[in-house]
Image: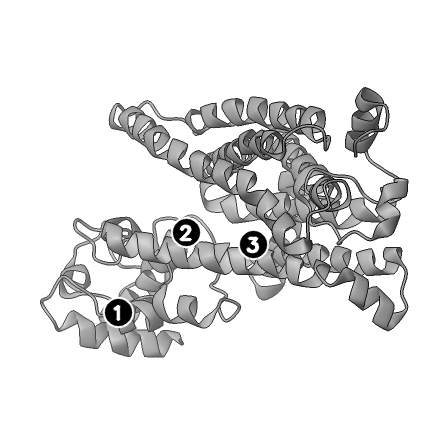
Amino acid sequence: MSIEEDHRASIKTAEKSSMTIPHTHLMLHHGVLDAHTAKYKFPGSGTQEDPYIVGWVENDPRNPLHFNDSRKWLWSLLMALATMAVALTTSAYTAPAKELKADFGISQEVFELGLSLFVLGFAVGPIFWAPLSEIAILSGTMCILVAIIVPETYGPFLLKRRAQALSKLTGDVHVSKLNKNELEPTLRAKLKIALSRPWLMLFHEPIVLILTVYLALLYGTVIAPIPAIDDSVADGNQLYMFFGAFPIVYQTHRGWSEGISGLSFCGIALGILLGILYMFPENTRYQKIVDRNEETPETRLPPSIVGSIAIPISIFWFAWSNSPTVHWIVSIAAQVPFGFGFVLVYISVQEYLVDAYTVYAASVLAANTIFRSAFGAVFPLFTNVGSLLSTFIDSVTDGRNV
């Protein structure tokens, strides 16, 4: 939507006295104004030397933080489902592994390369798209429901467009309070910032690098998608990671069918559910700290401590209980701490990074995603001779298990 169109929509909306904004205006006019905002006296004189400093006003209907809970939940759910849909497509590639390799006459390495390139897309995308959210909006890549229902909620961008709309409406000079001391960068400067900032954040901020490496290890060595197995896994020539061990444990050694072995992930699912439930009282704890004005970004991290303990417990428990001589429910139960711990670690680390880097959070998360996805993409290509997990399991069970 152009600035001129935003301006016309702002004039039309400003003539109304209602404190609500129609959904179509939320979606299409990022600088939309209601009557109260259009008449609000912002600090400043409206000149080039002393412009009006535009921010949120009391009971601001366009402030994303003021949307009701039902809207927030709906939009969050849609975004979560869209993200999950992307993740689930990896299984669509790996499930027919035997058939694909047979039809195209390709080796296991070539097949894994296709999966690696898919995961690599998660790393390449944020380099271009995520940092741009700090200077512009990028849409069109989400599913239709998200595109229709979820409006722009990035505060700095909304305030910038509001300032532009007010300048058009009144003829005075308005600037966002977040940009009052900044000159409008050129397109070349914008691109330079957008493409370089994630890397600068990654390698110049030690905490970003440490947390990113930790999540990359979890993603690449434990939860990265693994190609479907074939008969050669029994010889130890395939990738043995946590999820990759499931079909080996339940299909190869327990004789379960592909359909039934899919139920072996129920332990992980239960753990994830428990992790989500754990975050509700955790959010209550955090809100109490916020009410006392004592919150810091580090206040977000206690759940990650619990999760970082639960994850290795789960892996060791699974390794020691997956023999066919041990009842299957024991190894299924061993997965629960992993799903629980991963949710706690992932959510709390992401929240910490957002709170710590605020307006630069998109670049920080982009750096995190780039490194994590690149690790997950490359790891399967050079670890097909076995992993520490399989070596450990073999050593403690004398080769009787995976």
Which image quadrant for residue 19?
Answer: bottom left
- Mark 1 lies on a secondary structure that is helix
Circle 3 is placed at which residue position?
Answer: 131
Residue type at mark 3?
Pro
Tell me if 318 is positioned left or right of 151 in this view. right
Q: CA distance from mark 1 to mark 3?
A: 27 Å
Quarter holding the N terminus is: bottom left
Q: CA distance from mark 2 to mark 1?
A: 27 Å
Q: Residue at x 16, y 57 (%)?
A: 40
- Residue nearest the observer in this picture, 113 or 228: 228
Res. 51 visible in picture:
no
Of 158 and 153, nearer the camera is 153
Q: Earlier in the sequence, mark 3 or mark 2?
A: 3
Q: CA distance from mark 3 to mark 2?
A: 17 Å
Q: How many marks?
A: 3
In percent of width and height, residue 171 lies at 26, 70
Of the residues under marks 1 and 3, which one precedes in the sequence? 1
* SS assignment at label 2: loop
Q: Position of residue 72 (x, y in %)?
A: 31, 53
Would you say the residues marked 3 and 2 are in contact, meaning their CB atoms lie under 8 Å apart?
no
Residue in the picture at 88% in, 49% down: 232
Nearest to viewer (mark 3 / mark 2)? 3
User: Residue flagged by tag 2: what amino acid is it?
Assistant: Asn
In the image, residue 117 above or below residue 232: below
Q: Is residue 354 left or right of residue 395?
A: left
**Residue at the left extreme, as displayed:** 17
Per the image, the residue denoted by label 2 is 179
- Residue 23 circle label: 1
